Image: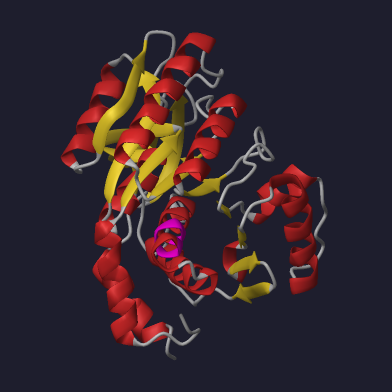
Amino acid sequence: MKQNTDNLSIENVFSKLNNLHVVVIGDVMLDNYWWGDVDRISPEAPVPIVAIRKQESRLGGAANVALNCKALGAKVTMATVVGNDKNGAILQQLCEDADIQTQLLSFSDQRITTTKTRVISRNQQMLRIDDEITEELSLKEEHGFIDSVLRFLQIEKPNLVIFEDYNKGILKENIIKHIISHCRELGIVTAVDPKRENFLSYQGVSIFKPNLKEVREGLHMEIPEITIANLSEVHSKLQQALHHDVTFITLSEQGVFFQSNSTTSIIPSHLRNIADVSGAGDTVIATAALIFTVTKNPFLMAEVSNLAGGLVCEQVGVVPINKLRLLEECKAMLNS
């Protein structure tokens, strides 16, 4: 596909997203939001008293990636392990309410469901409470999880597998390697949003999408200046370790970088009224992976996902992309 994509072909690309089946594997979270009012300081300690008036639970972490894939039109299956607890049941219900398939959702008596509760007043986050266990899956849980996922991939043959790693213990090295190897045998596109713990464990993945901080930590590189030359060196080092297809690095306010073979570019971000960057990375990996699966065009992948990440930053809280708004944005921006 050409760099300047006409409206019709963009619409065709977006239409083809509806034919995809995606499996999202990784660390899910339940994002709780407590909104309230503050009008006095506690007599017990110098802290504000928040009178809660509204509570809401949303899908977070890998589940937010799944939600973004669903918002873009794909059929989505969520593969993870959560606690056999109230929050795990809430997370399962939220997935089902969003029409995200849960047959690969496992419940553990040894873990709790990762839950992040944000207390908000006057559109400002005052406090975040994290309730989680970050130890790796036990060997018994690991083997059962691998078996169920590989069996599902063999039978269903989805188009795409996305790994979403938050260092919460689900994506162990053995799990990663078995699933990627099986996907390559079946011709399934794979993408990962990695974290430091297993940064170089994703050998053979199709799309490797860290952010700049994760690259610096994972490769122990300074990267003093954002240039094509410096980032191409990053791609070269990653290629030596991973033998992957596409390097895709998010650069925060400076946009995104991609390289595939000799094709490379830095695509600058667009001017936005930033309200909240929470969940933007989830939107970017979901959009990038789906667009690449349909087109195999890394430039279009980077362009569209760069726009998608910017759009969700204009809203408060973790929210999925709006497909129609993204399509209109692509029509306006990709030909300008």
* 138 on left or right of 229: left
Magenta: main secondary structure equals: helix
**Number of callouts in the render?**
0
Say left or right for 48 vs 155.
right
Can residue 31 be seen here? The reply is: no
Q: Residue at x 19, y 36 (%)?
A: 96
Residue 114: image x %, image y %?
42, 26
* Colour mapping used in the image: secondary structure
The residue nearer to you, when weighing 62 against 103, is: 103
Residue at horizontal 79%, vertical 66%? 230
Please state the horizontal and vertical placement of residue 7, each as a whole percent of the image. Answer: 31, 85
Residue that extends furthest to the bottom in the rendered view of this protein: 336
Magenta span: 288-292
- Is residue 100 in the magenta section? no
**Which of the 4 image quadrants contains residue 31?**
top left
Up the image or down, 223 lies above or below 278; here it is below
Closer-to-camera residue (48/203): 203
Furthest-left residue in this view: 97
Q: Quadrant of the C terminus?
A: bottom left
The image quarter in which residue 249 lies: bottom right
Q: Examine the rendered structure and indicate whether residue 177 appears above or below residue 215.
A: above
Q: Is residue 68 above or below residue 309?
A: above
Residue placed at 75% from the left, 66% from the top? 232
Q: Position of residue 80 (x, y in %)?
A: 39, 28
In the foreground, 281 or 260: 260
